[in-house]
Structures are given as structure tokens and as C-alpha cells.
Amino acid sequence: MSIISFVNKAKQTATTPQPFYPDYVALLIVSLFIFFLTRYAVTYGAGSDPRYTLIVAQSILDNGTVQLNGYQEKEIWGAPADFDGNINILKVNGRYYNYFPVGPSLLSLPFVILTKAVGWDMLRAQDNINAQRLLASFSVIAVFWILYHISCVYLPHRASLLLTAVSLFGTTLISTLGVAWWSINLSVIFISLALLLLVRYDSGQTLSVQPWLLGSLLFLAYFTRAAAAAFIAPALLYLAWKDWRQMAKTAVIAATLLALFLLWSQREFGTWLPIYYSAVRLQIARTPIWLALLGHLFSPARGLFVFSPFFLLLIPGLWLLRRQTRQPLLWLCLAWLALHLYVASRGTNWWGGDSFGPRILTELVLPLTLLLAWAWREGQTLLPPHQQNVWLGLYGLLGLTAVFIHSYQGLYNYSTILWNEATQEYPVPPFTPPHGDLFNWRYPQALASNAMLCALDRERAATILAQQSPLVPYEWGSPLPFDSLATSYALLAAQRDQPTATPQLPALFVGWEPVDNDRAPYRTTQCDQIAVYLRLTAVPTTPTTLLIRASSFGSQRAVVALNGQPVGEMHFTQQPKLAAETTVLPLDPALLHPNAVNELSISLPDAHRAKLNDPTRLSLAIADMRICPVNIAVTSTDTYNCPSFSNE
């Protein structure tokens, strides 16, 4: 059944009673789909901001405190705890705390108690990741059900199901909430529950907003994420407009809970608010607000209307809502949108750091979906049938585009995550556009692929070599420094931070992964054609040898070329636990260019991904690579130290 026929049938049944069970069977089926889609996604963010959320919850159980001092001598995620060197750990009067809000940790206690009973330990990386992914999947399902019931206040069941599905699978509700246990997961749940109470009250389905419940939800939304204040303020103003008595009761409940939180913070930190909740975070240097606002809405990296283009229909859709200009709930949504956008645009890193799409605006999917539901309802009354079909067809097309972007690109294309590492947020002339790669339409994150990232890397490397000379003479026989990989993106990041510094690199690498690898000192290749640029002065007149010690993800051929001339092949076979083998290849010294930059390129015709769309597992994992000034032969298990040769 097509989308248009599905919706037309929904319109035809809008005035007839809807069956109860079939709708909930559909919800259960979609919920199962959400669970498997998110639980087994390729991308996940458990190791970033949420890394310590469940560890703090476990500390409450183990140590009776949110402090992390009890784990100072333990291993966390397979490495010794280094709280002093961790930017996400606060030190207050000798006590260590997670920088991010304590609310999600406290509310995760029941789940951590259950996982602890079956032997899980949140200090262990895999247990922590698995726990976060389960919680993330359940949270997306919860939001789906709540958003569906919000839509049902204004639309028939089938139309509500379609609207909710598009707003979930085609937005950051799934591509952000579904990859980790962020603070925003719980905040969105509490905000959506509060919004459900408000729309039921506004539509006359209930006579009261249940102030004790609404006040608690408003506090919990703020307790889990400070940005929820952008919803809380308009919500209270809406209640004051509708019924000031209910507003007063709601505010008293929320204020009482907030007062208890403030007292706890004063006792624990010596300040009325933990730093994460403080407005001090917004009082530092930042991008001009107009540029941040443009980026939030229309940039190819974080633009709301780029990643979820079906929301563009709200621009003409607001015309359909002109009859509702006196509705307080409409103004609540508009004020919420404006306030959240303003606060988000005042942040230092308005783009949300390493993320996919407009994750900072995830909460705004809720009011935007509500506006779409209203516009849909009004369109059924104001527009003739043929115009309704045109708009529904356009909605379906844009909705499917958004679903592809978020449910596939955002969850199953690892290149969209590597895009964050390979690009530059800030401009680095002449290598990036005037406002950085966040506004670079040639390389949009929503369409990121491994081929795109490889093309970007080659382009940047060529520009770097043409614009400057960062390479120092190569020391013959020395291993290339894979422990501090010199790539185009790393070099540009260093130049951005220290624009007057002169880089000194022993080599420039193109085609290697831009992120740290858990299997260091190995470095895996990202592209099926990689290159190393070396500056040589004197070159030997006798045969030289390329030595590579590497492992492979399956049998691999490495076709080697020197300054564009083929020189032969090397072969690598799969090794258990990345046990590297050493392979050598003679090089004709006549192909080397003295007093110039030389290109050593390696093509990998058999390259494959061991994991779906994960270019960091593309082919070779190289542990050692060097050029020896003599002709040598080694067995696959040998290590070798080249003799020295003067490059003067």
C-alpha cells in the first residue's frame, strides 16, 4: 500500500470509530523494529559523553556517593583511571565527579541494580556499552509511544502512526537517542510526557493537567538536561494563560524539587548548581549567533531542514494554522522553538561536537511534530482533495529521504561518524570554506561515504603540499611514526589551534583512518588507495627495500607504486589477534627523486569491509613501515632494523 493510499484511507476513517487492537499490534511491531534497528546499529556513542553515566550510578551502589574517588585505583574501560587527565571529570576539593548531569545516573539506578545482579560491571567497556545500548533502544521505543499518543489527540490512528513513524525514523530521535544513553534521552521522555498532559488538557480530554505530575516531569526534564528550561518556561506561561491556579500548583511542585536539588548541590559541590547546569558555560567566546542559527537550520552538517527536510512543509503549513493564532498551545510551541534555538546558538560548540546531524535540536522534534499534526488536520478541512494528495505525496517523498538519512546513514554508515574526525569545524584557509566544513556543501555529512572521505583526504593533502612544505627530510631506515599519525585533518587541526606554528612532519599520510584505534600501535587503512609523502635529499645508488609489517582483515594484495611508477606487489594473509607478518619489496633507487617530495602509494584491490560500512576495518592494519637503504630479505615472523644512511 502506498503512503498516499494509506493516508487517504486514514482520512476516510477519521470520523468512524477506530479498532483498538490492530493499532496497538502495529505499535508493538514497530517497537520491535525500533529495538533491533538501534540495538544492532554500527554506530554508537557510548564511549563519549555518556561514558561515566552508569559508572556514577554504580558508584552510588558501591560507595554510597556520586563521587568517583572509589574507582581511582581501578581500571575503567580497560585502562587505568586517569581522572586528572580527563576533561570530562571535575575535581572539586579533592573529589572527582562526572562533568555531565547527575540526573541520568540517579534515574538509571534500577537498571544498574538489575545488571549488577547478573554480573555486569559498568567499569568494563563491553558491559557498559551493552547496558547503554539497551537503555537507548528502550528510550526510543518510549518516545515513539508517547509521540503517537500526542498525535492521536488531533489525528485518526493511522495518520498518527504515519506521522509519528516519520518523525521518529526521520529525525535525531532515532539517530541520536538510539546510539547511547545520553542525558537527552531521559529529558526527551519527560518533556514528551509533559507535552502529552498539556495537549490532552488543551483539547478538553482532561479537566486538569495534574499539577503534581506535571511539576515533577518539568523538574525531571531539567534534572536530566539543563536545556529543558527552554520548554519549562513557555509551559508555565501557557498554564498561567489558561489557568493560573494550575500553574501555581505545578510551579510549587517543580520549585520544591528544584530547591532540594539546589540544597544537595550546595552540600556536595559548594555551589548552588553543578557547573553543567550553570549559565557560565554560555559566557565564553562563541560563534556569531546569526551564523550558529543558520548552521542549526540549513547547514549541510547540522541543518535541521537538511537532515529532516519534511519539516520544510511547516513553512507553508503555518499558513494553514492562521485560524489558531489565538490558541495558547500554538504560542507555547513557537516560544519553545525560538528559545531553544537561541540558547543552542549561544553555545560555544553550537554544532554539538562529534555527532550526527542536529542532535542539539532533538527536543524540537516534539513541537515540530505537533505543528505538523495541526497543519495536517487543518489541511483536511481547508484544502481540496487533489491539493491534499500533492502535499501528502511531497511529505512522503521528503519523509523517506529523512528516514534514509537518519535510520540508515546515521545508524549503519560508519563514515558519517568518521566525517567528524576528517573535517574542520573552524575555517583553515585556504583548505576549508570561509566558515569551515560545517558549511561545506561539497562534503555534506548526511551523504558521507568512505569514497567521499578518501576524496576529501586526497584533496587536502594535495593542497597542503602545494601551499607549504611541512615535511622534514626522511631518515632512512627509520619507522614511519604511526603512533602520531600525520594526516591532512590532524595537520589542519594543529594549524587551526596554532596558526603561527610551522609544522615539522617526517611524513604526510593519506588514506589512513582519522581516529585512534583500539589495537594501537597498529593503524588501519581507511581507503583502498593509500599514500605516504616523504621528503628526500640524498638517495642511495644501490637497491633499496620497502619493509611493511602488517596484519590483514582477510587475504590482501598491496600493489605498490613509487612516484607513479609500479614496483610490485606485497601479500598479506589474515592473522589471529592481529599477529603481524613482515613483507619486503625491492625498490629501484632510480625512481626516487632527490631534493623533492616523493609519493609512495599502495593500492588494495582486494580491500573489503569486515564490518558493514566500517572503513576503519577496510583492509590492512600496519604496525611498521620503513624504507631501508639496502636490499634485504626477511621471513614473515622476523623483525628488522635497517642500517643507517645519510640523507644529507
Image: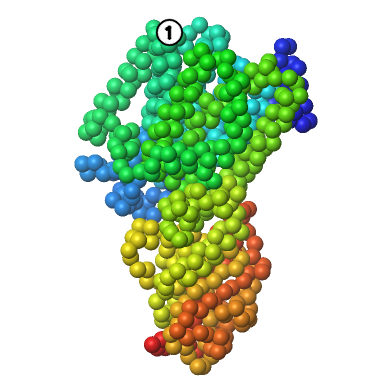
Say which of 27 and 648 sits in front. 648
* Residue at (44, 33) in percent of width and height: 341
Q: Mark 1, residues whose alpha carbon is within 10 Å: few (<14), some, or many (≥20)?
A: few
Q: Quadrant of residue 30?
A: top right
- Asked whether residue 386 is in view, the answer is yes
Q: Judge left or right: residue 38 versus residue 218.
A: right
Q: How many labels does the image show?
A: 1
Name the quadrant containing residue 144.
Answer: top right
Please tell me which residue is depicted at 48% across the width and 19% down the height of the picture: 331
The x and y percentages for residue 180 are: 49, 41
Is there any visible trace of residue 573 in the rendered image?
Answer: no
Residue 295's place in the image compared with 464, above or below, is above
Residue wearing tag 1: 243
In the displayed structure, 491 sits above or below 586; it is above
Where does the image place residue 172, in percent across and percent down from the top left? 54, 37
Secondary structure of the residue carrying numbered label 1:
loop
